[in-house]
Image (cartoon, helix red, strand yellow):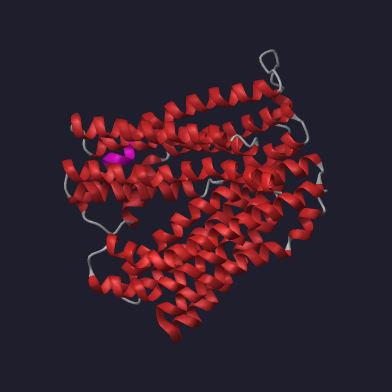
Amino acid sequence: MMKSRVAIAKKAFPIILANASVPLLGLVDTATMGHTGGAQEIGAIALGALVFSFLYWGFGFLRMGTTGYVSQAFGAGRYDEIRNIGLRYAVIAAAIGVLFIFLQQVILPISLYLLDTSEAIKRLVGDYFHIRIWGAPATLGMYALLGILIGLGETKKLLILQLILNGLNIMLNVIFVVFLGFGVKGIALGTVLAEWTALLFGIWMVWRTLNRLSPIANQTINWKLLFEKSQLTEMMQTNGNIMVRTLALLFGFAWFTNRGAGFGDGTLAANHILLQFVSLSAFFLDGYAYVVEMMMGKNIGARDEQAFKTELKLANELAGATALVLAILFFFGGELAIDGLTTDQTVREFAYQFLPLACLYILFSFYAFQLDGVFIGATLSKEMRNASVFSVLVFLACSVLLSHFFGNKGLWASFIIYVSVRGLSLHYYMPRVRNLF
């Protein structure tokens, strides 16, 4: 049992490190602009990145769908199908990315219309957007590559690929902005070049991995089988359900932020700081959830129900213990962290007040993460969709009622209910996972 726990932790640790490299990139981008530009340039980078986050957010199925199908094929020993799955998702990613490039003259005006900022910053966002959009096929293609690596359990290679992407991005941004003075355009150019470089390296990495499993150099691609109608129909249904699930989660967090804004600027800022603690905790919990995706899909493909039960139990124990430790650390060290993030005493006082509730959210969130991993590995996307939509509806109802009577404390209580209901809703569907064996 101890060896199994260690094996799970070893798989999760590279993912945690890979996740942690993402905010580091954002900090470097802000720092480079902060030393070479002004408030407008910093604001443009923040809003430009936000536009692309929303643009790409709904296409997380390119990563999650790939992981589920690849892990199942891997467990069943169907290595030729792994290649076919990767090619199918690569074609979809490329098509969506190219479509974004063609539609940039539509996407940008809509995005700028929705941004509540000055015309000067909007012009800088436009400069950023028109360069960054050329990385869309590479960004979405990377989703598919990461899905393959997670599905195969190659988390160390995932870490290497993420470090190449973010490390090169940081280096290029410093060169283009600090030394060459390209400003906002330099940030966008560095990101695009890093994305395409990482994509090419990732393709080579995945090809070598698949070739090791089953030599593919002399294999020919059966394009008719690759785009067989029933396979594509099933995949598109899965992807559509995952997209709805992702958008429901995004809406839940957006509702929380918007509802909190109604209690004043101090409360809004305090909630934003506490959400950084939640996001940091998600880096750790996501690591275990990704491993669960791989293990569950592999066990389902191999029809090994006993391994499924054992590994899920061990992963849940590790994730639960990690969530407890994180909640305790933030409970006792949160005030110090809050002081380091803001000097505004009013914001500090609000954040201190709601900190225990944020810690409870972190503690209760692990089960939703874990079961997300189970259902992604099982490719039971309809159940994920239903659970996400139901939990959001419960959250909306609770937040309206509880925040009316208890203010922001009621909102946080609703947020805790929301993540708990997400986990319980997925648990309700667990018999459907077991029916796959």
Q: In the rendering, at what x and y percent does residue 300 appear?
A: 77, 44
Q: Residue at x 51, y 67 (%)?
A: 361
Locate residue 417 relative to residue 132 in the image: left or right: right
Q: Is residue 230 magenta?
A: no
Q: In the rendering, at what x and y percent does residue 307 appear?
A: 77, 47
Q: Which residues are magenta?
A: 127-131
Q: Is residue 236 visible?
A: no
Residue nearer the viewer, 291 or 324: 324
Q: Residue at x 26, y 34 (%)?
A: 174
Locate residue 150 relative to residue 313 in the image: left or right: left
Image position of 280 with respect to 14: above or below: below
- Residue 226 in which image quadrant: top right
Q: In the rendering, at what x and y percent does residue 175 appear?
A: 25, 30
Locate residue 420 relative to residue 218 in the image: left or right: left
Q: Residue furthest top?
A: 218
Q: Across the whole image, how many numbered discs are drawn on residues?
A: 0
Locate residue 394 relative to residue 68 in the image: left or right: left
- Residue 182 in which image quadrant: top left
Dominant secondary-structure state across the stretch colored magenta: helix
Residue nearer the viewer, 11 or 142: 11
Q: In the rendering, at what x and y percent does residue 105 appear?
A: 36, 41
Q: Residue at x 17, y 41 (%)?
A: 36
Image position of 119 with respect to 90: above or below: below
Q: Is residue 401 visible?
A: yes
Q: Residue at x 55, y 57 (%)?
A: 322
Q: Residue furthest front?
A: 2
